Image (spheres, rainbow, N blue to C red):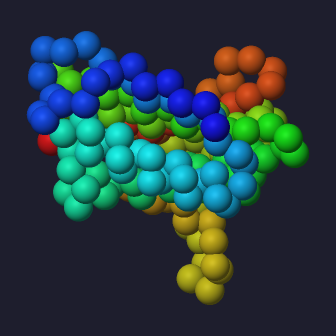
Amino acid sequence: MNADIASAPAARPDPSAPARHFTISLSATPRGARLARHLAAEQLDKWGRPYGTGANDTVTLLVSELASNAVRHGRVVGRDFRLRLTLYPESATLRVEVTDARPGRRPPGPGNLTPVAADREGGRGLLVVEALATHWGATSSDPYTKTVWCEIALD
C-alpha cells in the first residue's frame, strides 16, 4: 500500500488555503474497495468534515461506489486502482478520482445512464453518483488507465 498525503490535519479547513490532496494505490479487490471507503472517511475527518456528518457520509458512499466499480469492471490481475481526493477549501468542493487499469471499459456519460430493473441486484452505482455529485465523468489520459471522477459540494 502506497500513500501520499500532502497536508497536515487541521481542526477546520482554512478557506484561503491551497488545495489539499490524498492519493493511495490499493489492490483491485473487494478488500481494497472497502479500505478506500474507510480511508476517505478518515481523511475527510482530518480535513474538518467529521465522521457522521452529511459531507463525510456522502463522500464515503461515492468513494464506495466508484471503488467497487473499479474492482468489478476495471480490474486487471496484478494491477492496482488509485484513489485520489482533492479538497478545494475556497469553494468547499471535493473531487474524488478513482483510476483503474481498463481504459476500454468506460461508463456511459452523465445524463446517459439507463434505469435498472427493480428486480436486479446491482447496476445502480453510477445512478447514485449522478444523484449525489455536483458533476461527474470519466477520462483517459493514457492508453493504460481510465479515471472516473466526481465532485461534491461539502457545505
- 64 in relation to 76, above or below: below
- Where is residue 94 drawn, in percent x and y? 33, 34
Q: Image quarter for residue 154? A: top left
Q: Could you say which is closer to the camera, residue 9 or residue 147?
A: 9
Residue situated in front as seen by the camera: 10 or 62: 10
User: In the image, 129: left or right of 58?
Assistant: right
Residue 45 position in % (x across, y down): 26, 45
State the quadrant of the C terminus. Answer: top left
Which quarter of the rendered picture does the N terminus lie within?
top right
Residue 15 place in picture, x, y as percent:
12, 22
Q: Which residue is drawn at 21% across and 50% down?
A: 50
Residue 12 spot, x, y in % from top left: 12, 34
Please report the residue visible at 12 percent of the width from the left and 23 percent of the height from the top: 14
Asked whether, in this view, residue 106 is left or right of residue 98, the answer is right
Residue name at image x 85 percent, y 41 percent: 78
The answer to whether 118 appears left or right of 95 in the picture is: right
Outermost residue, bottom side: 119
Residue 110 vs residue 140, the one in the foreground = 140
Q: Can residue 54 be seen in this view?
A: no
- Up/down of 98 relative to 111, above or below: above
Q: In which quarter of the image is residue 31?
A: bottom right
Visible in this render: residue 37?
yes
Asked if residue 131 is positioned above or below residue 102 in the image, the reply reads below
Outermost residue toward the right in this view:
77
> How many numbered markers are drawn?
0
